[in-house]
Amino acid sequence: MNDLRLPPGQLTQGLSVGGPMDKAIAGFAAAVVRIRDVDPLLRELVRLRCAQIHDCRLCGSLRFDEALEAGFDEDMQRKIARYESSDFSPPVKVALRLCDAIIMTPSLADDNLRADLQQHFSDSQITSLCLDVMKWSQQKVLVALRMEAPPWETTTTLSFDAEGNPAFGKPAYS
Amino acid sequence: MGLGLEQRFERYCDGIAGILSHADCEEPARWYIKGLMLSGERKSIGRGLIHNTVKLSERLESLHPEAAAHLDRLDALASQTTDGELLQLCTEFIRVNLEGRHWQPPRELSAREEVFISFTEQFMVAVSGMQPEQISDLLQFASADEVYGFINALYVADMTQRLDIVMGRVLS
């Protein structure tokens, strides 16, 4: 469905799209990806929670290849929306609660959340999760402009090179 | 003839509720204002956020210096690549709302500022609810390139403030 709100013809390549700000955001995103102190399965659940809240069609169509290797499946994806009543482990639930607090209501970040986080994660890991949420909220820009429709129809793998740059590959499930 | 204290208070609450953008904020706002009137130690959301907040950049630098450097660069670029005064106005709007306080415009807003503030409110509350008309409104006052630049800068302002608040509360 073509519902673009800023038709590409109105945007100047290298000035706005692909310009200094886009490059700086990509640089930040890559730096966040290179932090590897949280396991890929948990990062994927947080990424997909961001996609749900922001209604990002592109993010929702992707599956992180390292998470797939670590056992991620579509049953997990379905449980994210109702994670509190799911059988996710306590660390997963508290990480998703952190994600919700950042995106929806920062005042939800209270002493209980702090205690729960510190029970399961180091400060470095908590910060990584926070940065992941910021990185995956970059889609807010694309969603606002409805520029985030995926060019593919099937769920597709997402991978990152050593520099943290994304690549989209093959269908996630054969 | 003067109104009674209770009537004057209700009228004050009506005034506050009447300028809230979302109907579902009205009842919480009334309770919040009544809570402020109670004697004794009270819990103010705004006060808690302000006092518990640590500088995001300081914590990031110590824990993840490379990401911190990139974020600093983003922050600097955000205000350079869009109208700095407009971004500052919208950033203040976000900050006040995230702190649970009521935003008062610093002056009478221009029509241009009004539509950018309206966009900012939708952006921070639920970007999925953004309507095409809200982009069209921006395009009355800015080119497509400028709108794109503004929204990217707003993303940085919005998310860094959210992280600042939350990290200040959950890190040791």
Image (cartoon, coloured by chain):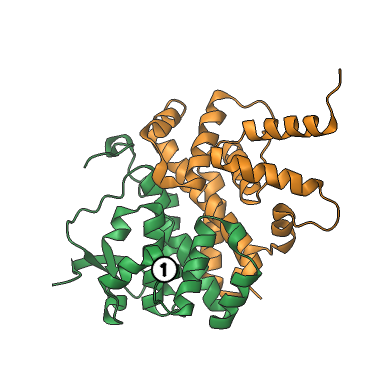
Chain colours: A green, B orange
Report the residue marked by disc 1: A83
Q: Position of residue B160 (x, y in %)?
A: 56, 57
Residue in front for this viewpoint, B6 or A156: B6
Above or below for B153 versus A5: below
Quarter of the image with the N terminus of chain B in it: top right
Residue B153 in sight in this render: no
Quarter of the image with the C terminus of chain B in it: bottom right
Above or below for B18 versus B68: above
The residue depicted at 56 percent of the width and 66 percent of the height is B68
Which residue sits furthest top? Answer: B1
Q: Quadrant of residue B21?
A: top right
Above or below for B118 versus B55: above
Question: In the image, what residue type sits under mark 1?
Answer: Tyr
- Sort mark 1 into few (<14), some (14-19) or many (20+) by Cα contacts within 10 Å: some
Which residue sits furthest left? Answer: A174
Label 1 element class? helix
